[in-house]
Amino acid sequence: MARLLVLLWSLGPMLWQLYTSLRPAEALSGGGAAAWTLANYQQLLQGDPPFLRYLFNSAVVGGCSTLLTLVLAVPCAYGLSRLGQRSSRTLTVLVATAAAFPAVLLFLALLELARDWHLANNLLALSLPYSGLCLPLAILLLQAAFRDIPLELEEAALLEGLGLWQRLRWVLLPLMAPAIASAALLVFIFSWNEYPIALTWLSRSDLLTLAPAMARIAGSSVYTIPYGAFAAATVLGSAPLILLMLLFQRQIISGLTQGALKG
Amino acid sequence: MSIHTPPHQGLRVQRLSRQVGPQLLLDNLDLDVAPGEILALLGPSGCGKSTTLRLIAGLDPVSHGEIQLGGRTITQLAPAQRQVAMVFQSYALFPHLSVERNLSLGMELRGVPSQRLQEELDQVLALLQLEPLRWRRPAELSGGQRQRVALARALLRRPALFLLDEPMSNLDAQLREELRAELRQLLRSTGAPVLYVTHDQQEAMGLADRIAVLRDGRLQQIGTAEQLYNNPTNRFVARFLGTPSINLLDEGAIQLGLRPEHLQLRPADQKLPEGWRGIAATIAHQEWLGDRVIVHLHGGRHGQLKLQQPQPAGSGPWQLCWPRSAELHFDAIDGTRRP
């Protein structure tokens, strides 16, 4: 019973959005019982640029940010986990501080950077701040996972004659798969949802990512609020994330609870 | 003494030391292990035996001293270049790979041609009876099976030296005893020197040709099990070998060491022959072990004593006696052997 309540509590808003997206505008503002409709979706998908364009843009930025973050975080976390006790603790505290730093304070500086280095209106460039912001958390997550791998496994590989890259490729990374999957998803979700930086760095409408695009839909008319279209956009925008979560749920759960049992 | 000593084909360790901060983990260790010889490193935990293995394997840096293997100095070489195979206490099998992949990964990445790889793999799998387990993951194996896989991996390395770090400590006592002979034969058959770390004296005595006893990073004594048992250089070695352990009797500046099997119970009023000594003792309790009985005694000011004999003792009164030739004499303070 309690579980059902929790489920309703967390699924409620999503179901409401789904319902809203399938109703015509009249029905939403209390104009009688209208039929179910796909008009909201049609309107979105046939817009200029079509809504799928935003999804694609977000996927590109998300994919790039994730890749860049992992490429930087994996060696970093490995190094941290293999350093001596004292220096690794100092560095870990620094990284944790960076992770806790409020990103809001960086917007102005980031905007200046974008202007000076001509990074505006460039999807790939947008993954630079995203990776930068996600890096500390990703490093902390992966470092904990590296620490959980017994050192003897790597030593055994060392005695077998495996080089550093071979040890990473054949022994460490496969064992890290759950942690890497969960770190990757966290980064991807962050960049999928990120709004303020995308809003300030992107102005061309065919380059918008999901969050600013949806804001534009919501504010597209002065006189009415297009509830239906907005709800449809929410549904379309969250569908890929839900899909990813379903695909990787087992890895995410085991990745996030890794190290929960051992100090 | 000739100047041209032939290159030593086994393992030779000279004045090997490891210091971490102010702590001396290993202090000037000298060892020689001939090809085909099994040397056990025996000692309590923290005595430096695992440190020794790690230094020889190249996993930890040497503070000073030299390691030679097959006439070649390997002190500064990377672990991969030392041609050394190690069986870890935890076996360190790769949990995400099948038994076969666990064994073949190293060879594959070292560039062994695939046909030779397959042949050697089949040979080792057959030798260690791992054939039916080929596709299992380590998590699906029992402790004994995991140990065999770890051994197989070490064999496939075709090493010039085997290092084994307490390979039996994760197995139950019965299996340990069964595997001892098997392991000894297998290690012997390779012809390479073997260094075997253990804290179990019975394992060391049953498996090794010679035993080196370590304490606090220092070598106490090295020799055959018989030499160590009958002729220990100090109290530590004497106490470490033998179950039940040696009895120590205070005699002023000297401590008498007496093995439980050298003690005898005789009627209290009996006169002892020439060269024998006796003290009054009362029986505390007896442990009946089937083939022998361990009698626990109160020896007055000598404290608790243990004696081993084939049959349980009657109620007494008894005197505890021994031939003086069986006495070992130790310095009461520093434990060194005295004549």
Image (cartoon, grey):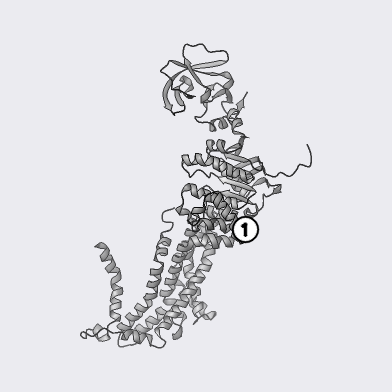
Name the residue at 54% across, 61% down: A170
For residue B319, above or below residue B186 = above
Provide residue A4's location: percent of width, then percent of height.
26, 65
For residue B299, above or below residue B159 = above
Name the residue at 53% across, 57% down: B100
In this rendering, does residue B60 appear at all?
Answer: no
Identify which residue, B48 or A138, lies in the foreground. B48
Residue type indicated by callout 1? Arg
* Residue B304 appears left or right of B235: left
Name the residue at 38% across, 88% down: A46
Provide residue A3's location: percent of width, then percent of height.
27, 63
- Asked which quadrant contains residue B103, the reply is bottom right
The disc numbered 1 marks a residue on which chain?
Answer: B
Numbered disc total:
1
For residue B4, above or below residue A111 = above
- Tell me the residue that label 1 is attached to: B116
Identify which residue, A82 or B259, lies in the foreground. B259
Identify which residue, B303 or A41, lies in the foreground. A41
Q: Residue furthest right?
A: B3
Identify which residue, B314 or A16, lies in the foreground. B314
Provide residue A177's location: percent of width, then percent of height.
47, 63
Please tell me how crowded label 1 is: few (under 14), some (14-19), or many (20+) other residues with Cα within 10 Å.
few
Provide residue A159's location: percent of width, then percent of height.
60, 53
Q: Residue furthest left?
A: A32
**Dot 1: element:** helix
In this rendering, does residue B317 appear at all?
Answer: yes
